Image (tube, rainbow, N blue to C red):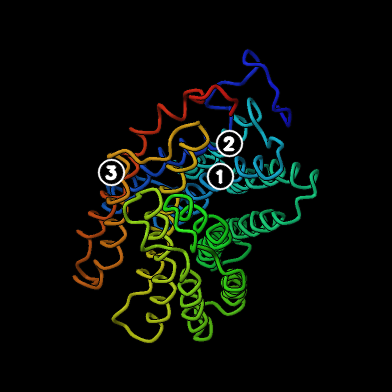
Amino acid sequence: MYGDPAVSADRRPWPIAAKGFRPFFLLAAVFATLILPIWLLALDGRLPVGGYLDPIYWHAHEMIFGFAMAVIAGFLLTAVGNWTKRETVIGLPLLALATLWVMGRAVLSGPQVLPGWLIAIVDLAFLPALLIAIARPLIATRNTRNLVMLGILAALFVANLVVHLDVLGVLPGWRRRGCVLGIEVVVLVILVMAGRTFPMFTRNATGVASIASSPWLDRLSVGAMAALIVLDLVMPEHAISSGWAAGVGIITFARTWRWGARHAFRMPLVWILHVGYLWISIGLVLRALAAVTSHVPPQIAMHALTVGAIGSLTLGMMARVALGHTGRLLAASRLIVAAFVLITLAAVVRVLGPLVVGMTSYRPTLFLAGSLWTAAFLLFLLTYVPILVAPRVDGKPG
């Protein structure tokens, strides 16, 4: 199931296993639709969840290492095949990899019936397997430009390991640091890929030839974010780290000056990417403000990055990649446009809610944001399940 594009039609795998984005985008969307209602019920004490992790950290861990990791896996397994002209994994190996991801969610979401060390091993096994799957073609083709993705996956593994070592009593007090590291590494992935793709997507969709990236600003933003990750590991919640975060937020915004966002608002598959990216700058600046004023709760900065940036961009990229890699026209349906609006509203409510109603009575905004998020991914499922489980419309493999 590796490498040879000239596979006869009768030997092709089932459509769901024909390309990495198919099972992982499907799993990510199903999980995104379920996790918020489950967590909100757990907060109300109506549903026990996360025997290995308490409900708050179960929610944080699973949004990063469950949902976001599934989207990253689907994207990388597909993109690396394009970059190298060699398959990563398809067919049964791909389904086995997806099953490994599901097993991690299963052992972490229910009551703790297994020893802690075994739960940790099951959950931690996915990232090394994914790393091997994408390393094979990258190394075989000497694709040095994209070897950074191996380092990023290794960093995500370390972040997940830190959480588990806290739970197991080896690194007490580190689980929050592990979750923050995971979020920041996901943001780093976005910064790397945004510079490569968002200007190109916008230029191709609008026909505006002046749209381009700025290579030196691209390098500066990625380097500054990597430095922030190191600072947060060495001196978490320090004033220096918070001040640096503000600088990174300004740089990430500045790099978009030639990305052509103003030309994109009639094209939903493009504007959702620009809106999602903007939440990175907002989240980093809010983090700095939270360090100097009690009027800005720290958690709203984190949710600007998670609900705003990660939520919007994963939804937007899944919608675009699934259309392009199944041979369909890059045009968002009305349901998907509605999903983009809903995920944007979810971020606005989640970030602005605590500022408007205060932290002591913001529970209704929490439930409203969760409902908007859930509705957005439910609309994605209604639209994309038939696409993800069907063969390409042009008859090509993949």
Which residue, given by chain and number where applicable, does mark 2 sit on? 20
Which percent across, then down, holds residue 50? 43, 48
Q: Is residue 252 left or right of residue 383?
A: right
Mark closest to the chain's N terminus, 2 or 3: 2
Viewer-proximal residue among 239 and 188? 188
**CA gap, disc 2 to disc 3?**
25 Å
Against 204, residue 199 (above or below) is below
The residue drawn where x is 22% and y is 60% is 365
Quarter of the image with the N terminus is top right
Asked if the residue under mark 3 is in contact with the one under mark 2, i.e. CB atoms within 8 Å, the reply is no
Residue 396, by quadrant, is top right
Q: Amino acid at mark 3?
A: Ala
Q: Compare residues 30 and 395 and report the one nearer the observer.
A: 395
The residue identified by callout 1 is 75
- Report x, y in % for residue 349: 25, 61
Residue under circle 3?
A: 375
The kind of residue tagged 1 is Phe
Q: Residue furthest top?
A: 10
**Helix, strand or loop under label 2:** loop
Q: Are marks 3 and 1 in contact (CB under 8 Å)?
A: no
Question: Which structural element holds mark 1?
Answer: helix
Assign a secondary structure to mark 3: helix
* Closer to viewer: mark 2 or mark 3: 2
Query: Residue flagged by tag 2: what amino acid is it?
Result: Gly
**269 up-or-down from 156: above or below:** above
> Which percent across, then down, holds residue 191?
54, 63
Q: Nearer the viewer, residue 319 or 189?
A: 319
